[in-house]
Image: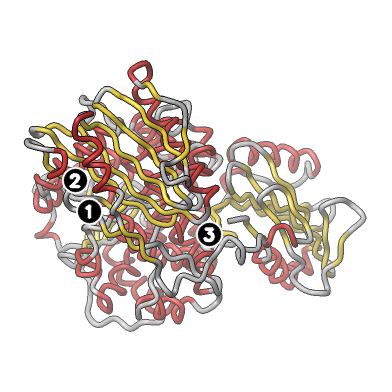
Amino acid sequence: MPAFGSRRRLIAGAGVVAVLCLAVPALSGPGGVASAGDAPASTGPDEATRAEVVRVVEELRVEAAKIRGLAWKHDVPADLLTRDQLKKQLEEMIKEDFKPDEYERDLKILRRLGLLTAEEDPLEMTKRFLEQGVAGFYNPKTKRLYIIDGLSVDAQRPTMLHELIHALEDQYIDLEARQKAVEKDSDLLFAMKCTIEGSAEHARKLYEKAHPDVAKRALAEQAKGQNMVELGKTLRETPAILFVPTLLNYQMGPALVGRYVGRDYPGGMDRIYAGDWPTTAEQFVHPGRFVNKDRDLPRGIAWPETLAEAAGAGWKGLEAQSTGELDFALWMSHWSGKNRGRLTIESMGSGRMWDKAAGLAAEGWDGMKVQILTKDGAPTGVALASAWDTREDAKEAGDALEAALRAQFESLFTANPWRDGSDGTGRVLDFTGPYGTGRILVRNDVVLLLDGFPKETFDAVWARLETTKFTRDPKDTWTAANNIDPVTQATWKSGAVGWQLPDEMWVADEKPDSFSKGDLTVRLATEKMALQAVVLKYYVDAKTNSPQAQIELTAITEVSVSGKEGARLDYEDPATGASHTLIFVISEGVTVVVRANAPKAAWGGASKDLDAALDALIWKE
């Protein structure tokens, strides 16, 4: 399924920034820094600022090489652009890469599925999103890196480091060629971009951990920026399917990369780039299905190429599209959610990018293709073939498709009751919608859908669709049976989150949900509120319990905990002589809160134990 926000040359994504505004991140993507002669002709930024940016990028080259464990083969030119210059750059890049046939195909798919109205222009909406959200980018085609003016130079250091990692890795793996090779498979392309962005984000977080003052300044300036307000407005007004895949490059990417590389970032990324790449969105939604011993690989789908021929004169089939778990979740969420495919402040703040029911329906995905067929040029027919992990997963997907069709067509949708299949297995739903005759078949762990064909030729098209072949990869060793939920065996658990004692030196305290090791005490909790509300609640509690402490929201920094995005607030209480840390982690509609404290004199050693405690958090997948 197409994702207009994921064009080949500009990859943009996000982490959790502006925690107290919208929990909407600043964006950056693979890019490079250009010379002055390559900048657009419009009025540029202040020359002194521009010179300072170029100087700091050069300074950070050494740190980027050290973090990534690679030597630079050649310099990468860098430049500073204004937002107006960025807009012109984007227009030129889109114009250069624009493929009218592919755009028209993608537009027909999204409009036929009801994910875009006739008035919505996805190209313009995506461009507006990128204009407002990009903080910097590396262009792997021109080998240049750009930083966007707006923040102080020091606050841009994390973005510069991120882009330098892209530029450095590009000298070894050729980002442009890698992406171009898979651009026709949107699910595989999403996985590749998640991996590339995950690497750069992981490096950025290592840099910020080593330079906490820089991280605090960057977060504080981003949160105050007027551009963040405009970005939040754009996100709320734009269909989520156009930009959520891009945002998730920066959220799901580092989550999987962090778990895969562990403490060996250079070696882990070298293994990935040597050929051990993640290949599906499913593996990023459920990282354990890639990083654990048993891997969940999708089934191959041999698509029947003769559906249009069976439909009759005037019919033409557009290219069948790979449709991943993320695509299916966003499609179903558009119809099952209350906001018709738009994100809200609450959903963004809770880390949930799609409706919960849609996520449950998409879980168990094991491969899917969708084809739109046109009648005299108009997108009319929809054909879908999909495989699922279990029969129950297939049933849930079939029910979700029925609900989506009912929501899309409303009173124009009529259906007979579900009936048993003609071969005695599975269940079938025959229906009629505004485009014509349709059917959903759930047979064992396979789901087929056909919608929008004339009654007189429907059976012929359906017979062709039933010839779809599914093949299982011999390396696909993951099964529902061997997928043991680690949360159920955790020392502490709350819903889909658990925590295991890091080592035998940790003990459970008398207080519930409290554990300690030596001088360090850690308390765990979950809150069913958006991140911003939870941060404010615990901030007020901290101010009340430690009135003499200097606790400021501007001191909040962005963190990654066990691959999840979060925020951290450190402070000292002069009345007790203790150092405190509050850590907030977004996970599946809840915020996990970790409260830690130890005597100030013992904090050096205790902080290492806290890192081990954070690594011991477990997430249900």
User: Does residue 54 appear to the left or right of 605 in the view shown?
Assistant: left
Disc 2 + disc 1, Cβ < 8 Å: yes
Q: Which residue is mark 3?
A: 213
Callout in the foreground (1, 3): 1
The residue pinned by badge 1 equals: 304
Residue 415 lies, with reference to residue 78, above or below; the image says above
Percent from the top left, x then y, of residue 467?
28, 53
Mark positioned earlier in the residue sequence (1 or 3):
3
CA neighbours of label 1 inside 10 A, class few (<14), some (14 to 19), many (20+): some
Q: Which mark is nearer the camera, 2 or 3?
A: 2
Real-space Cα separation, disc 2 to disc 1, in angstroms: 7 Å
- Looking at the rendered structure, the kind of residue marked 1 is Pro
Residue 156 shown left or right of residue 395 in the figure: left
Bin the neighbour count of mark 3 within 10 Å (Cα to Cα): few under 14, some 14-19, many 20 and up.
some
Gap in Å between the C-alphas at discs 1 and 3?
58 Å
Query: Against 388, is 211 above or below?
Result: below
* Earlier sequence position, callout 2 versus callout 3: 3
Q: Position of residue 507 (x, y in %)?
A: 86, 66
Label 2: which residue? 307
Position of 68 with respect to 72 (left or right) is right
- Dot 1 falls on a residue whose secondary structure is loop
Q: Residue furthest right?
A: 510
Is 599 on the left-hand or right-hand side of 283? right
Percent of width and height locating residue 120: 23, 29
Count of number-bearing discs: 3
Q: Nearer the viewer, residue 334 or 469?
A: 469
In the picture, which quadrant includes the C terminus? bottom right
Query: Which residue type carries mark 3?
Result: Asp
> The residue tagged with tag 2: helix, strand or loop?
helix
